[in-house]
Image (cartoon, grey):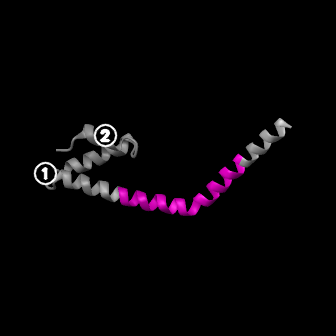
Amino acid sequence: MVNGKNMNRKTNNMLSKETATSLKAEIKKYSDTFNVADTQKYIKEVISEVSNDFIKNWLDKNMNSVVKEAVKEELQHIAKEGMKKK
């Protein structure tokens, strides 16, 4: 049987309430056929792998511009502070 309370706590930050409820219902449908613990472990592994790939791709594509923008903003802030002191 799916432990809804435990699943909701673990998916709270990752999935919307509606998605978590829907996922729980789908897993529950097949709980008599499949080992729910194994199914939950498999889903967690798949989500982790997909998330890691997504994050890596996003970082590879965007990190350079994010860092450049952050450094630029900080240098501008430092320059403004230096101008105020003169």
In the rendered structure, find residue 32 and report the number of the disc placed on it: 1
Q: Nearer the viewer, residue 78 or 69?
A: 78
Residue 33, given in percent of the width and then of the height, sits at 14, 55
In the rendered structure, find residue 8 and report the number of the disc placed on it: 2
Residue 62, given in percent of the width and then of the height, sits at 58, 59
Q: Which numbered disc, 2 or 1, marks the residue that appears first in the sequence?
A: 2
Q: Nearer the viewer, residue 86 or 1?
A: 86
Picture quarter with the C terminus: top right
Q: Which amino acid type is shown beneath numbered disc 1?
A: Asp
Question: The magenta stretch spans which residues?
Answer: 48-74
Left or right, 25 with respect to 59, comes to: left
* Secondary element at image label 2: helix
Contact between marks 2 and 1 (CB within 8 A): the answer is no
| Magenta-span inclusion, residue 33 | no
Given this view, does label 2 or label 1 mark the residue nearer the observer? 2
Is 38 rendered above or below residue 14? below
Q: Which amino acid type is shown beneath numbered disc 2?
A: Asn
* Secondary element at image label 1: loop
Q: Name the residue: 50% across, 63% down.
A: 57
